[in-house]
Image (cartoon, helix red, strand yellow):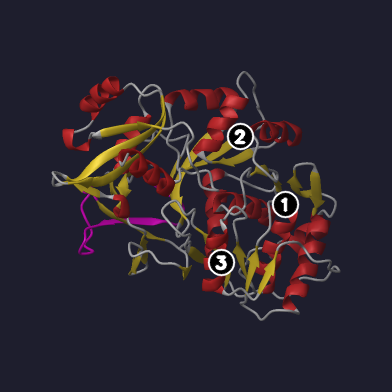
Amino acid sequence: MTPTVGSAIPALAAAAPGRAALVCDEQVLTRARLAEGVGGLAAWLAARTAPGAGIALAMGNAPGLVEAFLACAVSGRQALVYDPGWPAPYRAAIDAALAPALTLEALPEVAPAPFPPSPMPGAAFYVGFTSGSTGLPKGYRRSHRSWVDSFMASEVEFGLGEDDVILAPGGLAASLHLYGVVHALHIGARAVMLRQFHPRRVLRLIARHGVTALYATPTQLQMLVEAGAGERFPTLRRLMISGAKWRPETRAATRALFPNAGIAEFYGASETSFITIAHPEEAVPPGSVGRAAHGVALRIRDAQGRDLKVGEAGAIWVGSSMLFDDYACGHAPETRREGGFLTIGDHGRLDAAGFLYLHGREKRMLVTSGLNVYPEEVEAVLASLPGIEEAAVFGLPDDLRGVELVAVLRGVLDEPALRAACRALLPAAKIPRRFLSLEDWPRTSGGKADLRALEAIARERLAR
């Protein structure tokens, strides 16, 4: 029978009941303890809710959240993984839109119970939420099959297996870290997590447990590099980075900190899972995010849906069995399906060797002086300049140009030097007209730049 998320846990527990399955800070759950907890909670949920019901998990990062998530999966319910950092209006809006049958803020006392029959592979089991960087989070729904096929892609692309110790150090409300923990438990590897991200604590866990594989965002990686300066962690053999925008000095420092780690960078989205992988063993051209991941087909299409030639830029369409089902709440007009393919509005181009180059997101594209500008392109140039740690670019109304480009920067702001550097790297219409310095950089709960907050700051400063 086709496996489903969590279905392997009883067999793994029977094979090695005392083996550590999940580590959270100082707490360790064995395979047997995890199976008992998940089985008992699955039976408890089945007695109180209907199959397919949405169960809101409004819990902090802890083993209990993992148990509850897996109990929803194996019992045929949908886990709605809430972010404990949401402001009250966000939480109220999500509750109103999804009307969960049950909300868990802590684990109930349950007795051990055997696992129920597995749900169908195509059944929905998880609703995650976007980071909210541009507004109220959207809820995206995933099926068992989409994640199990993503697990297979991870094993093929990253070489992960039962003997690995896999660390996902961030909040499980972010799908990257939830996926890392659940995948590890699914294949019998040891999963390591934290109640709260702290770079020194992450490094101690890597050393104590001999972590071999690490999922991280660029921001987390930068913090680890700064906290571990002068140290070495040789057990790490695979570093998996999502959405990386690398500074050369960060890459060099990462190699010094983790000298034996192959660095795999992947591009994907909540709606698609993996899209491309940039492998350490492969000569990836500068500016590319790699080639299509295992099981993925890519197409570049114009606004009329016609396939474009190699080298031509257009919307990126993704075909795979890892795509999401639908939006449980919220909407995204740029997300469209056609002929087994999905686009989320990202634009880019493919070269003759199949390497993908990103241009930017359709919904962020700006028109200034009649020229299409992707803020991501300008942000990448600015972030590559000496002294600039992060950059965010926005288009604000301008009577002459229609839109005026404004850059918010974290780092050392030398405006004449910035303008000179931009003139050497960008067309005149893509050079920001205003530069604003900001050290207290707002972030989403997933660690990404909070674009909505940054744009509001830029508007407020320029209105003074």
Question: Type of residue at label 2?
Answer: Arg
Query: Mark 1 = which residue?
Result: 62
Above or below, comparing residue 75 to residue 64 in the picture: below
Query: Mark 2 = which residue?
Result: 237
- On the image, the x and y values in percent for residue 237 come to 61, 34
Picture residue at 24% right of the left edge, 48% below the top: 366
Q: Disc 1 and disc 3: Cα gap in Å?
A: 23 Å
- Looking at marks 2 and 3 on the same chain, the residue that comes earlier in the sequence is marked by 3
Residue 2 location, quadrant: bottom right
Picture residue at 79% right of the left edge, 41% below the top: 26
Residue 39 location, quadrant: bottom right
Q: Disc 2 and disc 1: Cα gap in Å?
A: 26 Å
- On the image, the x and y values in percent for residue 126 come to 58, 65
Q: Which residues fall within the magenta stretch?
A: 290-313
Picture residue at 22% right of the left edge, 37% below the top: 430
Q: Nearer the viewer, residue 35 or 56?
A: 56
Prevailing SS of the magenta stretch? loop
Q: Mark 1 and mark 3 in contact? Answer it, CB < 8 Å.
A: no
Does residue 246 appear left or right of residue 72 in this picture? Answer: left
Q: Nearer the viewer, residue 65 or 115?
A: 65
- Looking at marks 2 and 1 on the same chain, the residue that comes earlier in the sequence is marked by 1
Query: Mark 3 = which residue?
Result: 92
Query: What element does badge 3 sit on?
Result: helix
Above or below, comparing residue 138 to residue 441 in the picture: below
